[in-house]
Amino acid sequence: MRSELKSPPKKTTASVRGKAPIKRVATVGALTLASMLSFVSPASAATDIRGTESWSTDKLLMSLCTGSTAKTYWFIDVNTGKLGKDTTNGLPAKSLPAGYERFEGSCRYPKASSWTWTGSDTRVTEPLVNCAYGSTLSQTVQANGSTTSTTTNSVSGSVGIEWTILEKVLSIEAGASYQRSWSYAKQSGWSVSTTIAVSPRRTGWLVLRPEMRTVRSNPIFHVDRYSWGKSGGGQENTTTWRGRSYNEITSRGAYYDAKGNVLNSQGKPSGKYVAYDRAVNSSDC
């Protein structure tokens, strides 16, 4: 049986602000960041089995589908939903204990939905200090940062997730429409030149308020073979889940979220540059 571990913490980008900053300057290079949710047709007629068992089918799918698309072999206690690896890789057995069933198959990770959202403000320039009393300081500065790429999952306690493999799988499953306009699975640094104007006796800097995209995948498990013990000995074999009428299963509460920056035509993060400033202090001038 599988021991439980805590899921890796989500990666977040903290906001960076000075002491009592004031957002004074109109945004530069503003984009509309209206959130948009879109759903796609399922890649196949997978059956949502959530609610069909006395145990969590969400946890089942997240335990079966941990990033790999290779064939896997399992035992399941159908009274509790607990899984165990079948180390014989599906070799015939004389019998199965009461309450245990055996199955084999593979996972895929189709896109279920996607949406855009506004990320946290992140400082992208060094502070520009204007110690003068009567004139505005206007200067071209270099804004620098890196794109974001994170993956989260829906079921706490999920174990054995192959994060590196999963990232590659999800980047492909999301589809070609996002390959050039989404930073997921291709994190990289970026730099742009822009101009900042700082009022007298103020210190100013720019933050990026990025446009982000999430692509959600509900993993699907395809059953190649499913077996349970006969009352008189031996096994009953089928190619459907638990001998029912379907051979592909999903559970709507089991999902992976792939998150990254929306990229512009130059491959840099889309969003808004916002200028902040604060009063100078004795260490500035």
Image: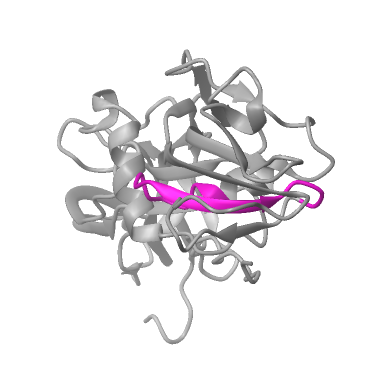
Q: How many labels does the image show?
A: 0
Q: Is residue 127 left or right of residue 82?
A: left
Res 33 visible? no
The quadrant in which the N terminus is found is bottom right
Q: Residue at x 15, y 36 (%)?
A: 266
Q: Is residue 86 left or right of residue 174?
A: right
Q: Nearer the viewer, residue 149 or 112?
A: 112
Residue 79 falls inside the magenta stretch:
yes
Which region is colored magenta? 63-80
Given the current orientation, which residue lies at the most extreme front position? 232
Q: Which residue is drawn at 23% across and 48% down?
A: 195
- Quarter of image, res 205: bottom left
x, y (%) of residue 235? Answer: 61, 41
x, y (%) of residue 45? Answer: 52, 15
The colour scheme is one colour
Q: Which of 257 and 166 is in front in this view?
A: 166
x, y (%) of residue 201? Answer: 42, 67
Q: Which residue is drawn at 78% across and 30% down?
A: 52
x, y (%) of residue 173? Answer: 33, 33
Q: Is residue 169 above or below residue 47?
A: below
Q: Which of 165 and 85 is in front in this view?
A: 85
Q: Nearer the viewer, residue 33 or 141?
A: 33
Q: Residue at x 75, y 46 (%)?
A: 78
Res 133 visible? yes
Residue 103 falls inside the magenta stretch:
no
Given the current orientation, which residue lies at the most extreme bottom position? 283
The quadrant in which the C terminus is found is bottom left
- Quarter of image, res 25: top left
